[in-house]
Image: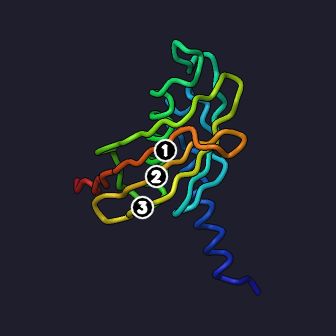
Amino acid sequence: MTDDRSTDAAAAQDRLDAIAAEQPPFARILGLRITRAAVDRVEAEMRVTEALTNRNGNLHGGAIMALADNLGGTATFLNLDPGQGTTTLESKTNFFRPIDPGEVVYTVTEPLHRGRKTQVWQTKLLNKDGKLIALVTQTQMVLQKVQG
């Protein structure tokens, strides 16, 4: 006899994995790879390439912000009903240390607030030693289904 709860949990995780895998083209340009997707946590990684560096030869702050923005949007989508969407309302970034080309940025995105109209997510960007590169907090607006 099949356990309906484990079947439901597997189907729910399959849905989350499908949403996480459906990244926009810009995420592919960044080289973003989702490694874990759950309603309360998204983990990802991105290799720093020359194309993503600044004048100092480190990962560009805009690439850091873009990475975190994409992850906040992905995390929000994991919590939406079918037909709903999201857009970023506000984002704040603190930069702590540089990271060089060839290295990998590891990320953890977790909710600070998951409401019906807005969600707030915090993304930690870490180096291979677990040291904080940047911390991004962003607010996502939940876009309701459009009635046709």
Q: Secondary structure at mark 2?
A: strand
Which residue lies at the image location 38% right of the left edge and 48% below the top edge?
A: 138
Q: Position of residue 111 (x, y in %)?
A: 45, 60
Q: CA distance from mark 2 to mark 1?
A: 7 Å
Q: CA distance from mark 3 to mark 2?
A: 7 Å
Which residue lies at the image location 57% right of the left edge and 38% below the top edge?
A: 133
- Answer above or below: position of 68 versus 140: above
What is the three-letter code of the residue carrying label 1? Leu
Q: Position of residue 53 (x, y in %)?
A: 56, 19
From the viewer's perspective, is the residue at label 2 or at label 1 nearer? 1
- Answer above or below: position of 40 versus 136: below
Residue indicated by mark 1: 135
Q: Secondary structure at mark 3?
A: strand
- Answer above or below: position of 99 versus 143: above
Indicate which disc, 2 or 1, sits on the residue closer to the N terminus: 2
Q: Position of residue 4 (x, y in %)?
A: 65, 82
- Cβ atoms under marks 3 and 2 closer than 8 Å: yes
What is the three-letter code of the residue carrying label 3? Leu
What is the three-letter code of the residue carrying label 2? Gln
The image's mark for residue 122 is 2
- Answer above or below: position of 8 versus 79: below
Front residue of this view, candidates 22 and 51: 51
The image's mark for residue 112 is 3
